[in-house]
Image: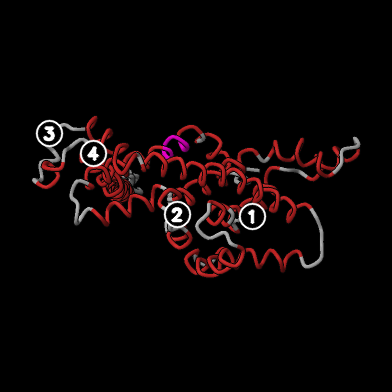
Amino acid sequence: MSVSTAPRTAAPLRPRLLGRSVVNLVVGISVAYTLLPVLWLVLASTKDRNALFSSNILSLGDFSLVRNVKDLFAMDGGLYGRWYGNSLLYAVLGAALGALVSIACGYAFDKYRFAHKEKLFGLVLAAVMVPQTVLALPLYLMASGTGLVNTYWAVFIPVLFNPFGVYLGRIFSQGYVPDEVLEAARMDGAGELTAYFRVALRMLGPGLVTVFLFQLTAIWNNFFLPMVMLSDQDLYPVSLGLYTWNSSASVSPEYYPVVIMGSLLAVLPLILAFALLQRFWRSGLTAGAVK
């Protein structure tokens, strides 16, 4: 009795190719959905006001990139440059200090034993789920009681503490800092601060960069807290300043080109930060994945 030995690879191969085609289609649609607004922003920033209202964005004429940049930094006495500097101050300095605080807190939760540690960490996890807009009014009342409303500190201090950063700090500490290394440092006579700054913090470099990038993105795009805290336009970040100009554009159409150009320039620091710190960020995201 003979047994058929015909190959059976054709049947499984077709579903596999079909599944791969569906995945590629979904990825292509997602990429197009993400990049089309960016492409429109780049093209629109090179056009003058007349081209924007006549739907000639895709044409090669009406090129006005240099003029738009000059108008942007000349509008309202060069207010955009001040907004940009404020955003860099809030975001870069705030993200750096906030990342250091978060990593230190996460390290303490991981390496030290103290009373009610897990209960306190549970409160940290609960705070992660609280929307930032819910905290805006209590923060405003606290700032008003201390006289910090309409100052840099009203926006700068709240961004230094991030519960999600503390959670990431503990995860990175568990994945990057072996207890044996700390014990060896203590046996060599290093104190707790010395062991942290000279040994643990160097191992936590990828985690520090990852938390910094998350903080940088969140603070740079922060809108609601500055809107609640600030009334002086000289203290505005870019996000709030562009919102103010965009609100005025319905009455004064000359604001439209500068708002679009300002939005394009506002994206550049985030792109630059992710491009320069990408290798640290990748290694940080894979912490503990391979043992």
253 or 205: which is nearer to us? Answer: 253
Number of marks in the rendered image: 4
Residue depicted at x 69% and y 53%: 106
Which residue does the numbered mark 4 point to in the structure image? 45
Name the element at disc 2: loop
Query: Percent from the top left, x then y, of residue 201?
Result: 71, 40
Res 64 visible? yes
**153 in the magenta segment:** no
Disc 1 to disc 3, how far (Cα)?
50 Å
Three-letter amino acid code of the residue under disc 3: Asp
Q: Give me the disc on residue 94.
A: none
Which residue does the numbered mark 2 point to in the structure image? 222
**Mark toward the start of the polypeptide (2 vs 1):** 1
**273 in the magenta segment:** yes
**Mark toward the start of the polypeptide (1 vs 3):** 3
What range is drawn magenta here? 269-274
The quarter of the picture where the C terminus appears is: top right
Name the element at disc 4: loop
Which residue does the numbered mark 3 point to in the structure image? 62
Given contact means CB atoms under 8 Å apart, are the residues at marks 4 and 2 in contact?
A: no
**Mark toward the start of the polypeptide (4 vs 1):** 4
Q: Quadrant of residue 154?
A: bottom right
Disc 2 to disc 1, how far (Cα)?
19 Å
Relative vertical location of residue 138 with respect to residue 28 in this rendering, above or below: below
227 or 46: which is nearer to us? Answer: 227
Res 6 visible? no
Three-letter amino acid code of the residue under disc 1: Val
Outermost left residue? 54
